[in-house]
Amino acid sequence: MTNYFIKGITLRNLFLHESIFMKLQTTLTTIAKKAVHLMFGYALYGLGIVMTINAHQGLAPWGVFHQGLSIQLGITMGAATQIVGAAVIILDILFGERVGWGTIGNVIFIGFFIDMFMLNNLIPIFENTAASYSMMVLGTVIMALATYVYLSAQLGAGPRDGMMIAFTKRIPLSVGLIRNLIEVTVLAAGYFLGGSVGLGTLVMAIGLGRLIQLAFRIFKFDVRQVRHRYVDEDFVLLFNRIKNGKAG
C-alpha cells in the first residue's frame, strides 16, 4: 500500500515538473519569437532613417533634432537618438506613463542600427537629385512599415508616443495638434542646432503618419485592440512568483 502511495506521489511530481518544463519552453519560445520580431522592426527603422539621411533632402522633425544634437556634441547620429530616447523615457515615467520592453529596445537598438548602417557605409549616397528624392521617399515608406512591425510585437510603443499621450492627458487639445506642436518644437530646436531641413522634412512630417495608417490597413492591424506587455507588469509577476515560492 505504501509503495503504491509513493509511486503515486512520484508520478504526480513527474507530471508536475513536466508541465512546468513545457510551460517554460513555450514561454521562452514566445520571447525568442517576439525578440526577433522586434529586432527586425528596429533594423528596418534604422535602415529607413539612414536612407533619409543619405538622401540629403531634409530629415523628419525628430531626425533634425537628433542630427543637430549629434553635430553640437560631436557624437554619432545613433548615439544622439539613444540619448534623446532615454530622456523621453524618463519624462514618460515622471508623467506616469507605462513603459514596455519594446520601448526600451526602441531607444537602444534603433540608434545601434543607425550607426551600423552609417559607419559601415552600407547605404549609398546619390548625386542625382531624382535618385536622392526616390531614396528619401522609400526610406519614409520603410519607416512606416517598421513602425507596424515593432508595434505588432505588442511589447510597448516608442518613447515619443508615450510623451504625446502624457501631454494629451494634461492639455485640452487634440492628439494630432499636440503631436504637431511637439514636432514643430523639436524641428525648430534641431534647425538651430544645425540639423538638416528641406523638402524631405515636409514630406515626412505630412506623409509618415499617413503611411503608417496605410500599413495598418494593409496588414489589418487595429492599434486600439493591441494589449502591450509592460515592464512593471513583468516585475509584479516575478515578485508574486518569488513570494508564492517562498510561501510554498
Image (cartoon, grey):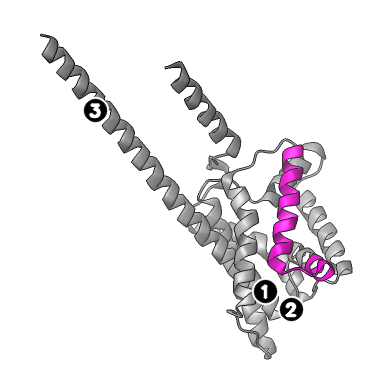
| Mark seen at residue 52 | 1
What amino acid is found at the position of numbered circle 1 in the picture?
Thr
Indicate the quadrant where residue 207 lies: bottom right
Give the residue at x 51% y 24%. 240
What amino acid is found at the position of numbered circle 2 in the picture?
Gln
Residue 43 placement (x, y as % from top left): 55, 64
Task: Determine whether label 1 and label 2 are within 8 Å by CB.
Answer: yes
Residue 127 placement (x, y as % from top left): 68, 90
Indicate the quadrant where residue 53 lies: bottom right
* Disc number lying in front (3 or 2): 3
Q: Which is nearer the eye, 28 or 44?
A: 28
| Mark seen at residue 15 | 3
How far is disc 3 from disc 2 in space, using C-alphas?
A: 63 Å
Residue count near mark 3 (Cα–Cα under 10 Å), binned few <14, some 14–19, many ≥20: few
Which residues lie in the magenta part?
67-94
Earlier along the polypeptide chain: callout 1 or callout 2?
Answer: 1
Give the residue at x 49% y 26%. 242
Residue 153 placement (x, y as % from top left): 50, 50
Q: Secondary structure at mark 1?
A: helix
